[in-house]
Structures are given as C-alpha cells and as structure tokens.
Image (cartoon, grey):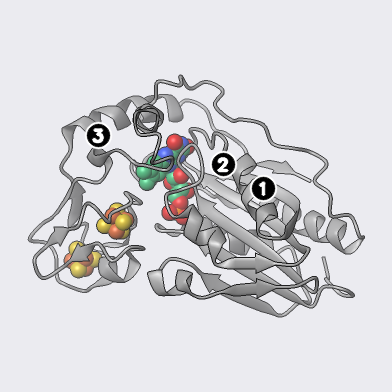
Amino acid sequence: MSAEGAIKRLHLIYFSPSGSTEKIVRCVASGITGLPVETHDLLTPASRKKEYVFDKEDLVIFGCITAGKLFTLSDELFGCMKADGTPFIGLVSYGNGYYGIALTEMRKRAEGRGFQVAALGAFVARHSIDTSVAEGRPDAEDMEIMKEFGRRACEKILGGDRELHNVPGTNWSQWEMGNKVIAYREEHPDEPYAIPPSYKAKAISDACVKCGNCVRHCPVDAIDIEARTFDLDKCIGCWGCVNRCPKHAITSTSAEMSEIMKGFSEVASRTRLEPEIFL
Ligand SMILES: Cc1cc2nc3c(=O)[nH]c(=O)nc-3n(C[C@H](O)[C@H](O)[C@H](O)COP(=O)(O)O)c2cc1C
Ligand code: SF4
Ligand code: SF4
C-alpha cells in the first residue's frame, strides 16, 4: 500500500525486551510503502524520558510485549507519547498462551493520549521465558498476514476511515484465571502490572564474558555486571537480559517458576494460535 495525501510520516514505536515485538512492528510496517519512516525504540530509560509528539500528518505503529495485559512500564510508554488525532495501529505480542485484556487496555491508553485507534492486532511470538513455546514465530505464514494487515490498515486510514469497527474482547479462552501472574496481581491490587518475584530470580554464571549486552538491553538499569547481581526492586521480569546474552550465562534460579512454566508450556504447546486482527 502506498501512503500519500494527508499522511506524511510513518513512526515505528516499540517496547521489545527480547526482540520479537520489534520484528512484528517492522513486518506490519512492510505493508506500507511511500512514507519516510522514523523509529523510536522505547527500551532504555533515556528513550522513555523524551517526549514524542505527533499530529494528523503522522501515522503511528506501536507494539509491546504482554503478560495477560500490558507490561509493567506501560505508564511510561504511553506517558511519553502525545498525539492530536494521529491514526494509531496497535500491536501486542504474546507467547501462544493469551494476551488477556492487553488490546483493550492499549486502545484505552492510546485514546487517552490523543490517538485515533484505527487498527489493532495480536500476534504470537516465541515465548521469552520458555523459548521452546512458539519457537520460530513469527514465521513466514505470520509475516504474510502481518504485511497484509499493514497494507489494509493503511488503505483504510488513507481512505478516511479511522474508526475501529471490530473491537477486541478478552482473550483468556482455555486458561484458568488461577494463573500465577494473575493471582499475584490480585493479591497486590496496588501493583496492576506486577510480575511475581519468582519470575525475576536469576543468576549470572562463569560463562559471562562481560560483553555488556544484557546491561544495554535492560529497560530499567537493574544489572550490575561487575558484581554479577540484579536489583530485583527495579527488575520488571522482562527476560530481555536472558535472551540477549550470547553466552547463555543468565538463568532462572527459581524452582517455583520452572514448575509454573511447565504447566503453562504444556497447554501453550498444544495448539498453534493464529494472528488476530481488528479493523
Ligand atoms: C513475565 C512474562 C510474562 C508473560 N506472560 C505471558 C502470558 O501470560 N501469556 C503469553 O501468551 N505469553 C506471555 N509471555 C510471553 C511474551 O508475551 C512473549 O514472549 C513476547 O512476544 C515477548 O516479546 P519480546 O520478544 O518483544 O520481548 C510472558 C513473558 C514474560 C517475560
Ligand atoms: S550478555 Fe551475557 S556475557 Fe554479556 S555481560 Fe551479560 S551475562 Fe555476561
Ligand atoms: S534484569 Fe530484569 S528488567 Fe533487566 S533485562 Fe533482566 S529481566 Fe528485564
């Protein structure tokens, strides 16, 4: 789809600790041609301290990781963006389990920042904790769908239609609400995005070569690589450091989490879930 007329710039914005969401955003954007592209990676604290201001000549594609809802830093992610009727294509990635209420939350938050939410999509990606779940996704089949989704969303927006006609519901389906992350949040109502401490407990082994990759990719500066320690008060449990380590030197130390993930992976590996798009 070639974008001309009222829209003059395409912005790709993402929060993607382990890299899958970035892939998804870029793939959806590949369905849109003819616009200069600006990319805003919101991984680092410094990037989220900036202000990103958009107007009606901008088109924004925004994507983020989810854990049954939006992820921990969502206040900052949406807080640094300000729009004035800017059309918005919102994307979430999830590990073949469920994205819960993430799209509904995303829509509300984006509208609260002045965007016009014209299209939403939920896409399966490799699970960042158990990477054997949805391994290799997004794959070629997903990518075809993403590109076509980008093309259709752009066509709709350029045609002057910026309403969201299909509204996402809650995607819990086969999952019991007793899931540990959900249960933990229910016990801590003041921390709506909390991730249980067992998901954060990690150690750095002797395989570490101090390349600094984990430090550069930690969204909250929680790693002291000299001391090989994590500040667990800061850590948001995103698993970016684990997946970005070229030496596989970072591993979970929590037997409890391994047990929880075993149950999750068993169900999540049963059925291949497909992309869901809302236009
Ligand atoms: C703490 C945590 C909780 C997660 N919870 C869920 C979940 O509830 N359901 C699911 O399908 N995937 C879940 N995931 C998987 C991620 O949503 C998925 O792997 C995502 O695509 C990773 O994005 P990224 O590669 O851009 O970081 C979770 C991942 C983490 C780190
Ligand atoms: S990415 Fe791995 S090898 Fe590099 S500093 Fe971090 S733990 Fe060490
Ligand atoms: S230390 Fe915590 S917040 Fe930082 S990258 Fe690792 S899991 Fe994510």
Q: Is residue 43 above or below residue 183?
A: below
Q: Which residue is mark 1?
A: 107
Residue 242 disc label: none
Report if residue 145 is visible in the image: yes
Quadrant for residue 275, please give it.
Answer: top right
- Residue nearest the observer in this picture, 79 or 241: 79
Q: Residue at x 48, y 60 (%)?
A: 76
- The image position of residue 33, as x and y in percent, is 76, 72
Dot 2: element: helix
* Spatial separation of the CA atoms under disc 1 and disc 3: 31 Å
Dot 1: element: helix
Ligand 1 picture quarter: top left
Quadrant for residue 147, please give it.
Answer: bottom right
* Spatial separation of the CA atoms under disc 1 and disc 2: 9 Å
Q: Earlier in the sequence, mark 2 or mark 3?
A: 2
Q: Are marks 1 and 2 in contact (CB under 8 Å)?
A: no
Dot 3: element: helix
Q: Earlier in the sequence, mark 1 or mark 3?
A: 1
Q: Which residue is mark 2?
A: 102
Q: Residue at x 20, y 55 (%)?
A: 250
Q: Quadrant of the N terminus?
A: bottom right
Q: Is residue 81 above or below residue 152?
A: below
- The image position of residue 100, as x and y in percent, is 54, 34
Q: Are marks 2 and 3 in contact (CB under 8 Å)?
A: no
Residue 257 disc label: 3
- Circle 3 crowding by C-alpha within 10 Å: few under 14, some 14–19, many from 20: some
Which of label 2 and label 3 is nearer to you?
Answer: 2
Q: Amino acid at mark 3?
A: Met
Furthest-right residue in view? 159
- The image position of residue 117, as x and y in percent, is 74, 53
Q: Amino acid at mark 1?
A: Arg
Relative horizontal placement of residue 205, taking residue 26 as reference (left or right): left
